[in-house]
Image (spheres, rainbow, N blue to C red):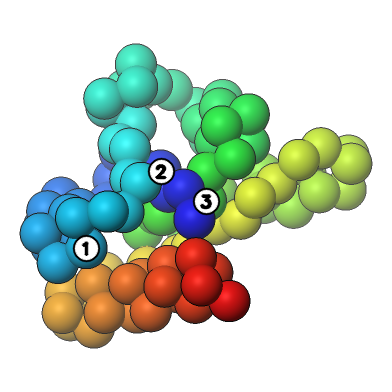
Amino acid sequence: MRLLADENLNNNIVRGLRLRQPDIDLARVQDVGLSGADDPTVLAWAAGQQRILLTHDVATITAFAYERVRAGKSMPGVFEVGRTVALRSVIDDIRKLHNCLQHG
């Protein structure tokens, strides 16, 4: 499972995932030259790289993701992470999904 952390994702989640799951394939929007890019651009890049997007953006990203699906475009997925969920829970849940998809 390849992941892309949206620009708005709490960086403590990224650090926690990398610390607790060193083999995780996780890129950040900022690190791939997409800082400030709009949602459709981020989703298109993620799709081209077969990466699931991790985001706190529940307001707009899902509409663009559904738009891609309706248009028949590639859409590996979006994990929306609530801002009020405990960091440990978020990290554990993403790790579980990663491990299930890697070994399932």
Task: Residue at 58%, 76% (x, y): give it.
Answer: 104
Residue lying at the far front in this picture: please name it.
Answer: 103
Picture quarter containing residue 62?
Answer: bottom right
Task: Residue at 59%, 40% (x, y): give it.
Answer: 50
Instruction: Describe the element under mark 3 as helix, strand or loop.
Output: strand
Residue lying at the far top in this picture: please name it.
Answer: 33
Q: Is residue 55 above or below residue 87?
A: above
Residue type, numbered disc 1 = Gln
Which residue bears the numbered disc 1?
21
Crowding around mark 1 (Cα neighbors within 10 Å: few <14, some 14 to 19, many 20+) is some
Q: Is residue 34 above or below residue 10?
A: above
Depth check, mark 1 against mark 2: the one in front is 1
Which residue bears the numbered disc 2?
4
Crowding around mark 3 (Cα neighbors within 10 Å: few <14, some 14 to 19, many 20+) is many
Q: Visible in this render: residue 53?
A: no
Q: Earlier in the sequence, mark 1 or mark 2?
A: 2
Which x, y percent locates residue 98? 42, 67
Which residue bears the numbered disc 3?
52
Which x, y percent locates residue 26? 33, 45
Residue type, numbered disc 3 = Ile
Depth check, mark 1 against mark 3: the one in front is 1
Tell me the CA gap for discs 2 and 3.
Answer: 6 Å
Check whether the beta carbons of the residues at disc 1 and disc 2 lie within 8 A of each other.
no
